[in-house]
Amino acid sequence: MNLIGHFVDGKRVGGTSSRWGDVFDPATGLRTGAVELASAADVAVAVQAAERAARTWRNASLARRTAVLFAFRELVNSRRDQLAEVITAEHGKVLADAAGEVQRGLEVIEYACGIPSALRGGFSENVSTEVDSYSLRQPLGVVAVISPFNFPVMVPLWFVPVAVAAGNAVVLKPSEKDPSAALLLAEWFAEAGLPDGVLNVVNGDAEAVDALLDHPAVRAVSFVGSTPVARHVYQRGTATGKRVQALGGAKNHMVVLPDADLDLAADAAVNAGFGSAGERCMAISALVAVEPVADELVARIAQRMAGLRTGDGRRGCDMGPLVTAAHAAKVRSYVAAGVRAGAVPVVDGRDVEPDGDPDGFWLGPTLFDHVTPEMSIYTDEIFGPVLSVLRVGSYDEAVELVNASPYGNGTAIFTNDGGAARRFQHEVEVGMVGINVPIPVPMAYYSFGGWKSSLFGDLHAHGADGVAFFTRGKVVTSRWLDPRHGGVNLGFPTQT
Ligand code: NAD
């Protein structure tokens, strides 16, 4: 049994709490680890270490910070297979998918290596006679990062490299379902030369999250998780004066127009619907078919689904198990609710025969047709391999449906009509839009974030927004006196 603690002030430590959580291998159903669930006192120790470290790290030169980031990039790059194995062992996603997650995280580290350019300010000479103005961006101090189970490496890496590069110290609270990868990242950052206390990992659940939200020394919180918790984190964090970006859940629609390439659309729907067993915030869960394409599209998707292999992520399968037994049971109950509500189960994943241990948390890819907007399989974020097809009569009806959703994370349109695509990108109320691209996750140098109930706060993750989030602006107006200065003048300063 693997006992999983915390990483504080440069070393692995145990906590004071007597509460533990279970960590499973989802492909076997075996309990493989026990993770300490931090108390508020444990969180306070980590924040204190971060406070101490932040005081000196903010003065580290940009050259020193980037040297650490480049070294960290090399370590993660050379150990990507090890990291992918740790992800698969606790999350269940197949190894190739886990390797993809590591790659997207690496890209944010690479972006953070360019922090000297991202932090550059502006300078205006002679804003008044012999007076200059310039802008700086400075770190906030201690910041918290709270991440979900579905990307145990990529989501921490959306924030931590940027926060650290900008001169902050971080307390990371990973998901208690798959906590091991975050500890490795912290150890490797230390190996790359990051001083003790600049990155701390505290494992835990809601108690640790609330302790971070209430701690006065924590200046900012980056959260990713489900919408109800994101709303809670935003409200509680901002109530204590913190800067908060809280990314929430999603229900992503893929609109297929009658002129689309149906083979491309069917491939995309299968990849985006069932990759990572649908446990992606950018997964496509609602396919909006603009008639008359639905019959043909559903047939082509079902044909592709017949070739998918569900099983242990270490055996070269296409799709792994769900993360826990409880989550698998919940997703199954949605499938049952869909059948009861009258949706047509074209492929029922409950019948799957997995290539893996029978005690794993299995559910095969599931396709529903004739889903209507009031059904719970449409209204709720299921977060599993369940794709719902809704049939509409026109482009306008499709956009109306997408815009009526309380979520606005990602969406995609499949069409060969450039004008329709352009209209869609303009009209749709969603933060990330794909045109013939089903999972439009922005590159690290753009920013990732949804609209409406998919993000509480203003700034998105990484890219320019990430740098802005982890820094505060300062403008300096300076004059070096020369003999011509004007003497006493109580008037309001204006340009002369
Ligand atoms: P979750 O909301 O259950 O947990 C997220 C984090 O919050 C975890 O660290 C957890 O320990 C903590 N937490 C859980 N309950 C809490 C509570 N009551 N109070 C305080 N903290 C609490 O989410 P999850 O199941 O780990 O992840 C899946 C969810 O994350 C999905 O809804 C998915 O859409 C969302 N997600 C969103 C994005 C995005 O970019 N918008 C990205 C990835 C995942």
Image: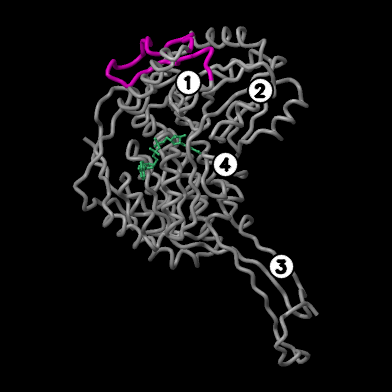
Query: Is mark 3 in CB contact (under 8 Å) with mark 1?
Result: no
Query: Is mark 2 in CB contact (under 8 Å) with mark 4?
Result: no
First-in-chain label (2 vs 3):
3
- Disc 3 is placed on an element classified as strand
First-in-chain label (2 vs 1):
1
- Whether ligand 1 has any atom under 8 Å from the Cβ at mark 4 is answered as yes
Q: Position of residue 34 (x, y in %)?
A: 24, 38
Majority secondary structure of magenta residues:
loop
Q: Nearer the viewer, mark 3 or mark 1?
A: 1
Question: Depth check: 368 or 359 in front?
Answer: 368
- Disc 1 is placed on an element classified as loop
- Whether ligand 1 has any atom under 8 Å from the Cβ at mark 1 is answered as no
Q: What residue would you read off at disc 4?
A: 448
Residue 433 belongs to magenta span: no
- Image-based side of 390 in relation to 421, left or right: left
Query: Is mark 4 in CB contact (under 8 Å) with mark 3?
Result: no
Question: Depth check: 177 or 315 in front?
Answer: 177
